Image (cartoon, rainbow, N blue to C red):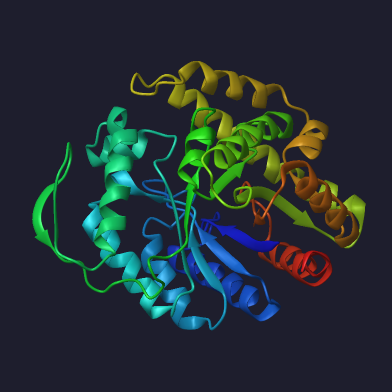
Amino acid sequence: MHFGIFMEFGSRPALSEAESFREGFRLVDAAEEMGLDGVWLAELHFNPVRSVLSSPVVVASSIATRTQRLRIGMAVHVLPLNNPLRIAEEVATVDQISEGRFEFGVGRSGFARSYDLYGIPYVESRERFREALDIILEAWKGEPFSHDGDFYTFEGAVVSPRPYQQPHPPLRIAATTAETFPRLGREGHPIFVGLRGMDIPELRGHLKEYRKAWRDAGHDGNGDVSLRIPVYAADNEEAALEEPQDSINAYFNRMGSLLRDAATNRAVADAGLRQGRADRLATMSYEEMLQTKVAFGTGESLTDRFTELKEELGLDSVVAELNAGGLIPEEAVTRSLRIMTQQVMPAFK
């Protein structure tokens, strides 16, 4: 099973933007040294209190030059916010610089604020995403092509460079709504899933539909599922449960606020679902979070937790969010990484 970490290059109180980058790169260096499989980068715009990672493809290029074996992924590149030809060029460039260590995670984001500030109607996000992805995959063939679509029109484009990995870097798509799971299964796409908006039983049902659609479409195997989940590791169980409590409460409070804000946007089609998830987060106890939303514990108990999740959800990879909420000290984040790589990962290799 692949083990990665999700990174936001988070902003901390009293830290400069330069120090936020330095802290993020220190974690990358530690991940390379400790043998982690990969790092996955968020894309976050117009939120300086939370993150400096507004240009993850640039950061991915820097990571590629300071590491030798670590895989570098996007989680996720929000395709409708940029021109797909430009995305194809930049991603192929990072794939060349990393000599094939890049992974292309994509999505359209569940929140409309960035779209509003960029002047792109969120109501068009689904259609823009589909059109952009088609263009990117065609561009990576390295042959002249033209396109006349609903949002993009051009003639005779030839994208250079082509990706180092052929036909293209591994593609993984975020799945967050019920209708997305069977569609991505039919299309044969590996997926990202998370527990921010849904609980494990709900996710298990969606994954059943994803795998059924995968098999019915005649694809080999049984699909490919990567779970993003908050992780905290300590040397004893008491510390593992007590130390991250304030941060994880802040994390889910923030998520509830984002869901409530999204539910009031007229361009959002599933407003009722988002409001329901926000209400659920508002009433969730810490004990319920521990059972259904996170993986906190010692090396031994985390091994048991990931074994259960692997069996229950059929996971192919885990992407650990080591500082969910942004309040966990840097040294504790590094300790979690060390315990995960040295005490947990070996059981799954």
Work out which residue is located at the far left of the displayed protein and give it.
Answer: 155
Could you say where residue 18 lies in the image, as x and y percent from the top left? 44, 68
- Position of 142 with respect to 301 (left or right) is left
Residue 53 sits in quarter: bottom left
Q: Is residue 125 left or right of residue 296?
A: left
Work out which quarter of the rendered image holds the N terminus and state it.
bottom right
In the image, taking residue 327 as reference, residue 136 lies left or right, namely left
Residue in the picture at 25% in, 31% down:
121
**Residue 25 x/y as whole percent:** 53, 72
* Closer to the camera in the image, 80 or 149: 149
Seen in the picture, residue 231 relative to 291 is either above or below; the reply is: below
User: What residue is rendered at 51% in x and 40% in y?
Assistant: 217
Asked whether residue 322 is in view, the answer is no
- Relative placement, left or right, of 222 versus 72 is right
Report whether residue 204 is seen: yes
Q: Is residue 221 above or below residue 199?
A: below
In the rendered image, which quarter is residue 126 located in?
top left
Q: Residue furthest top?
A: 272
Which residue shows up at 78% across the image and 28% down it?
Answer: 285
Quadrant in which the C terminus appears: bottom right
Looking at the image, the residue that sits furthest to the front is: 218
How many numbered badges does the structure rendering display?
Answer: 0
Look at 31% across and 31% down and name the residue there: 122
Nearest the camera: 255 or 31?
31
> Compared to 4, does 112 lie above or below?
above
Q: Picture coordinates of residue 276 (x, y %)?
A: 59, 18
Q: Is residue 215 above or below residue 265?
A: below
